[in-house]
């Protein structure tokens, strides 16, 4: 845990005595029966102090989180939230934390159910405190917290302290009696509390009348009373002071701050003013900024003296001023010494730099308006940020720098471009890259200010980084040739050891080649990317590559290879024990889709459930979409076409555009279901909307749609043998076949052959139909791609039966007929019954018909007796029998011999 | 009352605002509300000036809230006739 995070999770319990607020605490305790406590009041009303006092005495463990601006980034917020919860429930949400800290953190709404699940398992009651909630303004976070509140497990109570009412369903909670609220009117000190504070705690010994005057003047505002007490301490004539204070009409803070500061010794006043620029204070930092010594002792003295100093840890190393107090100090500093402020920030920046706290050093350099210093610091800080995937932070800094400062720094220019790209922004990227390129090429204009480079190592590798970003730009604009050119340049420039850049370049190249239809080259490129990233330790990225590699293998009809790829990916995702990596869920979805095509619905369903069990946050961005698409496929195979359509619509909704080519668009999948349902009108409307026609130029990216169009034509002409449209469909398919074969796209080739077989049969050309069918069987059956035939239903079954009596690939035909039988009860399909008998096994099966004994058979086959036993055992198990006699009977039944 | 179109124009672009708070503020505060001028009345102070847009206005309002000041009114000076938008000045206390 970083020191900063530790201070955010620390309940700032002051060691000072406090005014005990028993009635408020009683209300808070009673409120624990409800879901939420809201303490909503302006600054200085003692919200945090009250929370601390309540929690310290409540006997319930509390997870404390002090929010700041940075928590508006949802990932950061969730990381901090879980870290806070872990202070009271060690280990809770560890899996979520791991996922959040990965390359592409999962979306918040994928995480919440998992978080709720973990919270539901809390062994004891816990209060979750979110202090300074008003700093959150990201609507996404309000939505997330509303969701948490709606599903809050009974063990958890949410307590929120804020200056503004939060955008949470407060009205509903009020009506349900689930909300306890304390507001400004409740928090103001009442007269007895004012008396206790001034006379007991601050020991000022004031008369009742004087206390009443102060109560009236401050309206029970606690920060005002505390300031008043500070300005009265050690003063001789208190009644006179109080009279003057009461008679003055200025804002009490203006009046009292001046009093407080005026009464401090010079060095204390300087200390307070100069350190007011700091968000957090520690002795050494204060010394650096003030030029004084003894900072730690000073801070402790201020805490003891009630100077609005809040300890941020138990060791009293870090403190901060009460926000309001810091604001007023800064106002005085600004008014009294406006010229000195930048120097203070600069000293703070230097101190943080020496402490290797880049973000703070940069923040103070920017506040000092020392942009060159800030630029230097940013240039040094970005490589580390890039490694931890915080490009967005780098971009935030760079946006603040004046354009000219960035432009004369090639390294920063390229970082700027990278930050834009990572944020999905294309505008301005090339401009920044060109700026940097000009420095590299030495073509910068003469009049330009001199180049600045701080990080020489990065500068040396800049050419390849520029090419990498250009490759990404080209890919997102659909310029595939340019993508490949730039990616090649990266590979030429980057030394063998830089696996990340090489992997990224190979991946981009693979995507471009894929989208262009060069499947084999794309496959090769992606394999290299996957291996490189794995070697470099980017395991999750490597698993992500496996999705693409397997997709490509499926396109090429290599179901066996795809299976191996998913299994290897799953292995990588699970290795290293304990926590599965992101992408594990994707592997199961892939395995499920594969099992579908092999007709093994049981396995398909199991993998899909397994993916869901792992949790959505173990899926890459596209996984939810793929999950739904696969679930739709299962429904389709089960014959629930309406269910399939619903899931496809859901998949459409979940689709996130990424760089993967959309090879099988959801709209086309939906059209295929409509065709099956006989909803020709809907399917035609789809074809029109997609501008599909039989004379289109054939491109790989539209191939699936074109084949779907051919299906539509065939389905329309079902009963009209002589209709010219049938011929049109056949011709269309012939063109597709040529293109698909040319591109090595075996999956499409097989499907086209199947459709041709059906079309020729429809025309009455049985011979040609069988030729096509045989070709399809030869391609698809060795890979056990069964559904490609079974999907076609009765016409295919009839054709196969006819074929079984005459053809050469009888074994495969039998398997398919078996699959057709099972399709009636598709969910119960037993994969083992679908396994192919090998040529050798068929040979053994034929010999089993003879009277030969085992040893004689072995001799005839020239194998050992053991090998023969292995063969017969396999044959028996595939045929589902136990004896030689039963095997022969079954084989005759099935026309295997 | 201004015509709707004029109002829309005023809402989109920069506009002159008067913001009244209950407290009497020191001259120091002018620096905190950069660009706005500060004046005093019998009951409180007024910040006046040109603000770029609604976001700038909300930024000022947030500062007022964060400083513990009590907001009384926000007036946008659209045309010659200003339409004050009075907020409830009373803060209950027991």
Image: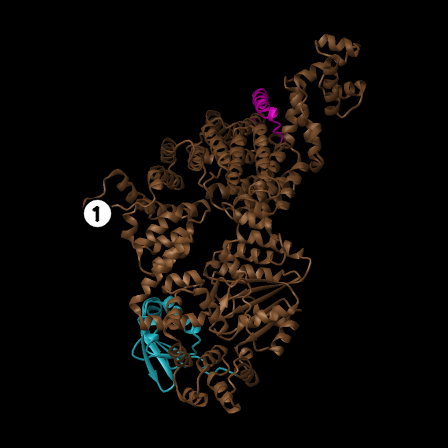
Chain colours: A brown, B cyan
The relative height of residue A610 versus residue A10 in the rendered view (above or below) is above
Residue A317 x %, y %: 49, 62
Residue A726 x %, y %: 52, 30
The majority secondary structure of the magenta stretch comes to helix
Q: Which residue is mark 1?
A: A448
Residue A625 x %, y %: 55, 45
In this rendering, does residue B33 appear at all?
no
Residue situated in front as seen by the camera: A603 or A276: A276
Q: Residue furthest left?
A: A447
**How many numbered callouts?**
1
Q: Quadrant of the C terminus of chain A?
A: top right
In this rendering, does residue A325 appear at all?
yes
How many other residues sit within 10 Å of disc 1, few (<14), some (14-19) or many (≥20)?
few
Give me the chain letter of mark 1.
Answer: A
The relative height of residue A698 versus residue A876 in the rendered view (above or below) is below
Residue A621 highlighted magenta (yes or no): no
What span is in magenta? A762-786
Residue A773 highlighted magenta (yes or no): yes
Residue A358 x %, y %: 41, 53
Residue situated in front as seen by the camera: A479 or A701: A479
Residue situated in front as seen by the camera: A722 or B64: B64
**Would residue B46 be found to the left or right of residue A647 on screen?**
left
The relative height of residue A43 versus residue A515 in the rendered view (above or below) is below
Residue situated in front as seen by the camera: A247 or A352: A352
Q: Label 1, secondary structure: give it.
A: loop
């Amino acid at each position: 845990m970083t020191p900063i995070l530790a201070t955010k999770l620390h309940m700032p319990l002051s060691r000072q005595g406090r005014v005990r607020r028993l009635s408020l605490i009683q209300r808070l305790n009673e409120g624990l029966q409800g879901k939420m406590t809201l303490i909503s009041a302006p600054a200085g009303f003692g919200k945090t102090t009250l929370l601390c006092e309540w929690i310290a005495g409540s006997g319930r463990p509390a997870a404390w989180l002090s929010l700041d601006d940075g928590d508006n980034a949802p990932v950061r917020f969730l990381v901090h939230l879980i870290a806070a919860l872990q202070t009271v429930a060690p280990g809770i949400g560890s899996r979520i934390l791991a996922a959040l800290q990965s390359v592409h953190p999962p979306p918040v709404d994928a995480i919440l159910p998992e978080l709720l699940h973990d919270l539901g398992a809390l062994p004891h009651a816990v209060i979750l405190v979110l202090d300074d909630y008003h700093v959150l303004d990201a609507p996404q976070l309000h939505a997330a917290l509303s969701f948490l509140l709606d599903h809050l497990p009974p063990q958890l109570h949410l307590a929120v302290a804020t200056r503004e009412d939060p955008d949470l369903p407060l009205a509903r909670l009020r009506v349900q009696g689930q909300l306890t609220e304390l507001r400004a009117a409740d928090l103001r000190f009442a007269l007895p509390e004012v008396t206790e504070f001034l006379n007991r705690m601050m020991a000022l010994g004031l008369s009742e009348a004087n206390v009443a005057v102060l109560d009236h003047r401050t309206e029970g505002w606690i920060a005002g009373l505390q300031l008043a007490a500070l300005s009265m301490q050690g003063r001789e004539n208190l009644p006179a002071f109080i009279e003057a204070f009461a008679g003055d009409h200025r804002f009490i803070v203006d009046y009292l701050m001046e009093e407080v500061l005026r009464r401090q010794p010079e060095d204390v006043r300087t200390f307070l003013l100069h350190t007011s620029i700091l968000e957090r204070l520690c002795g050494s930092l204060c010394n650096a900024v003030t030029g004084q010594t003894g900072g730690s002792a000073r801070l402790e003295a201020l805490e003891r003296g009630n100077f609005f100093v809040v300890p941020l840890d138990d060791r009293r190393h870090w403190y901060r001023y009460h926000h309001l107090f810091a604001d007023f100090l800064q106002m005085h500093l600004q008014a009294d010494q406006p010229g000195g402020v930048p120097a203070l920030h600069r000293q703070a920046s230097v101190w943080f730099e020496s402490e290797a706290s880049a973000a703070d050093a940069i923040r103070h350099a920017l506040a000092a308006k020392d942009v060159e210093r800030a630029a230097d610091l940013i240039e040094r800080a970005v490589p580390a940020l890039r490694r931890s995937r915080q490009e967005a932070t780098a971009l935030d800094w760079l946006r603040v720098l004046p354009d000219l400062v960035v432009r004369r720094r090639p390294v920063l220019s390229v970082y700027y471009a990278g930050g834009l790209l990572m944020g999905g922004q294309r505008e301005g990227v090339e401009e920044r890259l060109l700026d940097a390129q000009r420095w590299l090429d030495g073509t910068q204009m003469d009049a330009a200010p001199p180049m600045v480079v701080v990080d020489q190592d990065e500068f040396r590798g800049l050419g390849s980084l520029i090419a990498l970003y250009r490759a990404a730009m080209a890919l997102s604009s659909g310029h595939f040739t340019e993508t490949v050119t730039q990616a090649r340049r990266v590979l030429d420039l980057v030394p063998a050891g830089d696996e990340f850049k090489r992997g990224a370049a190979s991946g981009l190249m693979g995507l471009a080649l894929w989208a262009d239809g060069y499947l084999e080259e794309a496959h090769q490129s992606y394999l290299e990317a996957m291996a490189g990233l794995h070697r470099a330790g980017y395991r999750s990225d490597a698993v992500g590559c496996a999705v693409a590699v397997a997709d490509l293998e499926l396109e090429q009809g290599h179901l066996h290879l795809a299976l191996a790829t998913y299994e290897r990916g799953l292995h990588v995702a699970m290795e290293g024990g304990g926590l599965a990596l992101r992408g594990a869920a994707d592997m199961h979805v892939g395995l499920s889709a594969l099992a579908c095509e092999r007709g093994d619905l049981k396995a398909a369903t199991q993998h899909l459930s397994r993916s869901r069990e792992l949790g959505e946050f173990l899926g890459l961005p596209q996984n939810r979409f793929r999950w739904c698409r696969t679930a739709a496929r299962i429904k389709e195979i089960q014959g629930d076409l309406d269910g399939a359509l619903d899931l496809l619509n859901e998949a459409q909704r979940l689709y996130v555009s990424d760089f993967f080519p959309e090879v099988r668009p959801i709209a086309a999948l939906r059209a295929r279901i409509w065709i099956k349902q006989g909803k020709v009108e809907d399917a035609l409307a789809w074809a029109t909307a997609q501008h599909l026609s039989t004379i289109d130029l054939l491109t790989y990216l539209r191939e699936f749609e074109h084949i779907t169009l051919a299906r539509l034509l065939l389905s329309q002409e079902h009963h009209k043998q002589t209709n010219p449209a049938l011929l049109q469909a056949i011709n269309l398919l012939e063109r597709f076949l040529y293109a698909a074969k040319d591109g090595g796209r075996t999956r499409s080739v097989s499907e086209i052959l199947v459709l041709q077989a059906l079309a020729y049969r429809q025309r009455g050309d049985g011979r040609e139909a069988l030729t096509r069918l045989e070709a399809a069987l030869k391609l698809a059956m060795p890979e056990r791609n069964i559904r490609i035939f079974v999907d076609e239903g009765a016409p295919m079954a009839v054709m196969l039966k006819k074929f079984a009596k005459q053809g050469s690939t009888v074994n495969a035909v039998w398997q398919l007929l078996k699959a057709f039988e099972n399709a009636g009860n598709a969910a119960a399909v037993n994969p083992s019954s679908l396994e192919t008998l090998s040529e050798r096994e068929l040979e053994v099966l034929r010999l089993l018909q003879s009277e030969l004994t085992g040893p004689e058979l072995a001799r005839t086959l020239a194998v050992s007796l053991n090998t023969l036993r292995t063969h017969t055992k396999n044959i028996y198990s595939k045929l589902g029998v136990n004896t030689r006699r039963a095997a022969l009977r079954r084989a005759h039944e099935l026309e295997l011999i | 009352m201004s015509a709707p179109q004029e109002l829309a124009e005023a809402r989109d672009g920069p506009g002159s605002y008067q913001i009244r708070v209950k407290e009497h503020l020191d001259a120091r505060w002018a620096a905190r509300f950069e660009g706005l001028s500060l004046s005093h009345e019998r009951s409180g102070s007024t910040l006046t000036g040109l603000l770029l847009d609604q976001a700038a206005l909300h930024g000022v309002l947030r500062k007022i809230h964060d400083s513990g000041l009590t907001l009384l009114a926000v007036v946008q000076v659209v045309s010659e006739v200003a339409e004050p938008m009075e907020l409830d000045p009373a803060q209950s206390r027991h």
